[in-house]
Amino acid sequence: MTMIRSVLFCTLLIFCTMPAFADETVSLKLGYQTLTPSGTLAGAKNGVGTRIDIERDMNLDDNEDLTAELAFQLGRSRLSLGYLPMEYVGTGTLTVTGTYNGRTITASDTVRTKVKLDLYELGYTFNLINLDDGPIRFQLGPELAVKVVDAEVDFTDVTAGFTEHDSATVPIPTLGARTRVGLSDFLAVTARVGYMEYDGNSFMDAEAQLEFSPVPLVGIYGGYRTFNLDVDETDLTVDVDFSGPFAGVFVRF
């Protein structure tokens, strides 16, 4: 993931140092996201692995972490870079018998699990509707994005006495739509949705948020996000839903 982080960092520097245009808007959002997980994961060997429920069997906690987005808009076009880190840990009791990476797991075994997901996102929106001259401003257009998921899973069967580590880095493109409704100079509502199946993996993402800017160029925002991540790799299978609220501050320049 070093190369991915370097590309994202360089892109951030490019947009932060670009010359200003009359219609240009650069915004930076820093927020705090709470996400509750549900679903299953499996460590597979030769395509065989038992799906384990991450709520019932692993007892994973909710994730609370910082999130960031840099967006650049020129005319009808909007380019954004986003980053969302997630880490879930838990100790639970298995209710299934089967295998994890070829090792035998048994119902009633005590297990400890750590799931780490870093989500990187590059998105582009072209506003087919761009009404920004009236008292209520309205933008709507298709959004194409690439989500890069960097996943790591540490699974320990305390009862059986073994630990397994799995990792996967998966790029998934999504196609959807984004809209923004400016109700006044200081209040706006934004929403987006995207989905795609690619190379046996899929990603569905949707969110809505309210922006409040009582001071020019500075404001706060809050909203709700839900997404489904379905990763089917050689040694790791993940089918997980995440949902929860978020809030933060933003600046425009």
Image: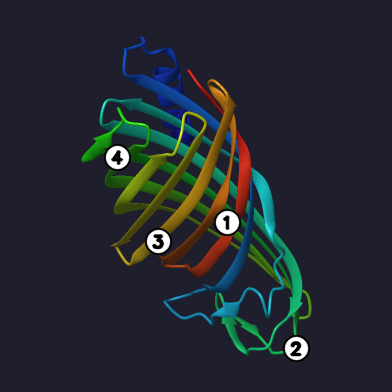
Residue, x 67% and y 59% (percent of image)?
88
145 in relation to 206, above or below: above
**Spatial CA span between label 2 and label 3:** 33 Å
Give the number of the mark in front: 2 or 4: 4
**Spatial CA span between label 2 and label 4:** 49 Å
The residue wearing badge 3 is 204
Q: Position of residue 83 (x, y in %)?
A: 52, 41
The residue wearing badge 1 is 152
What kind of residue is marked 3? Met
Mark 2: give few (<14), some (14-19) or many (20+) Cα within 10 Å: some
Mark 4: give few (<14), some (14-19) or many (20+) Cα within 10 Å: many
Asked whether disc 4 touches disc 3, contact meaning CB atoms under 8 Å apart, the reply is no
Mark 1 / mark 3, whichever is N-terminal: 1
Mark 2 / mark 4, whichever is N-terminal: 2
The circle on residue 125 is: 4
> Quick one: SS at disc 1?
strand
Mark 4 / mark 1, whichever is N-terminal: 4
Image side of residue 129 versus residue 248, left or right: left
> Quick one: SS at disc 4?
strand
The circle on residue 30 is: none
Mark 1: give few (<14), some (14-19) or many (20+) Cα within 10 Å: some
What kind of residue is marked 2? Ser
